[in-house]
Image: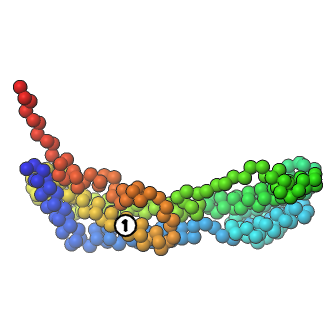
Amino acid sequence: MRVRQGLSVFVSVFLRELALVSRDRNILMIILVAPLFYALFYSTIYMYKSERDVPIAVVNMDNSDLSRAIERRLDAHQMVRVVLRLPDLAEARNLVEQMKIYGVVYIPKDFGSHLSENRAPVIKVWLNTTRFLVSNDINKAINEVVLEAGSRHRAAFFRLKGLNGEAASVMADPVLPDIRSVFNVTDSYGDFLIPGLLMLILQQTLLFGLVLSIAREREEGTLRQLWETSKGMFLPMAHGKIGLYVVLFSAWAILFYGAVFWMFSVSFAGSAGRCGRSLIPRPGRRIFRSAGSRCVRPRARPRST
């Protein structure tokens, strides 16, 4: 009997909240328009999820064949583009500070000769880290080019020692890592951030809508009527009040996982079960089942004597 009353109160409050929201333009704007606006706005920021052709400068004080080869490979890399070749490091650093370029690669004098003498030269890099995603991409591109150049040099050295091409390559790189990305297969910061960000935005906007609904009831003096509708059963009343927003959360989440993720090419390679559970906010997973069996405490059974 108590369970049936709890379900009745839950449904009554749920429908009452639906009627209240449908006639309040401000709440409708928040729970129906704001989530879509923020989803498109923030997703557009990460539409280009990896940087391409980031402008950098090279200060080559060596001008050896190897240092010029490094310049060419940097310019050929998809993440960076060598826009300036400067003779002076101070001028290049000033351009970084003025944000006209995002990085400087400094190849010191005697770079090639140090390598020929099996001494480790140092390539210095200055990065504009105000945009850390860009600076990380530049750092990654420079590391790839420098490691490749070092591998080629070691292979050439071993060939001079009499090893054939394959053996020299093995000696140059005795261990080759085989790195495979799981889930975020594009290594994109956008794919990492957008799903969680959209769920956070959705949670906050719907919570704001709920708060506005409660404030509106307080202004209109209908909170007592809400309590009378609940017949003194607090949990079914609370669950009925927030139940509408849980349903909206699930509906918006389905839309985000479908249309928005497809529109912005967010990779989707996770567990279907976990994605399904995320369609309902954690507190709301218990709402509908709590409206019945957990809305009231079961009566204690008399002990048998």
- Res. 107 image quadrant: bottom right
In the image, taking residue 150 as reference, residue 264 lies left or right, namely left
Q: Is residue 127 visible?
A: no
Q: In the figure, is residue 295 to the left or right of 109?
A: left
Q: Residue at x 52, y 58 (%)?
A: 183
Lateral position of residue 15 relative to residue 275, left or right: left
Tell me where residue 194 appears, x and y as whole percent.
Answer: 48, 63
Task: Say left or right for 100 vs 162.
Answer: left
- Residue 159, compared with residue 75, is above or below; it is above
Q: Secondary structure at mark 1?
A: helix
Which quadrant of the figure contains the C terminus?
Answer: top left
Image coords of residue 280 (percent x, y): 33, 58
Determine the residue positioned at 47% across, 74% down: 263
Query: Which color scheme is applied?
Result: rainbow
Looking at the image, the residue that sits furthest to the left is 305
Residue 290's x, y, as percent?
A: 21, 50
**Quarter of image, res 298:** top left
In the rendered image, is residue 64 in sight?
yes
Give the tally of numbered discs.
Answer: 1
Q: Residue furthest top?
A: 305
Give the image location of residue 192, x and y in percent. 52, 59
277 to 48, vertically: above or below? above
Residue sitting at x 18%, y 48%: 293
| Residue under pointer 1 | 254
- Type of amino acid under label 1: Ile
Residue at 11%, 39% (x, y): give it. Answer: 299
Mark 1 nearby-residue class (10 Å; few <14, some 14–19, many ≥20): some
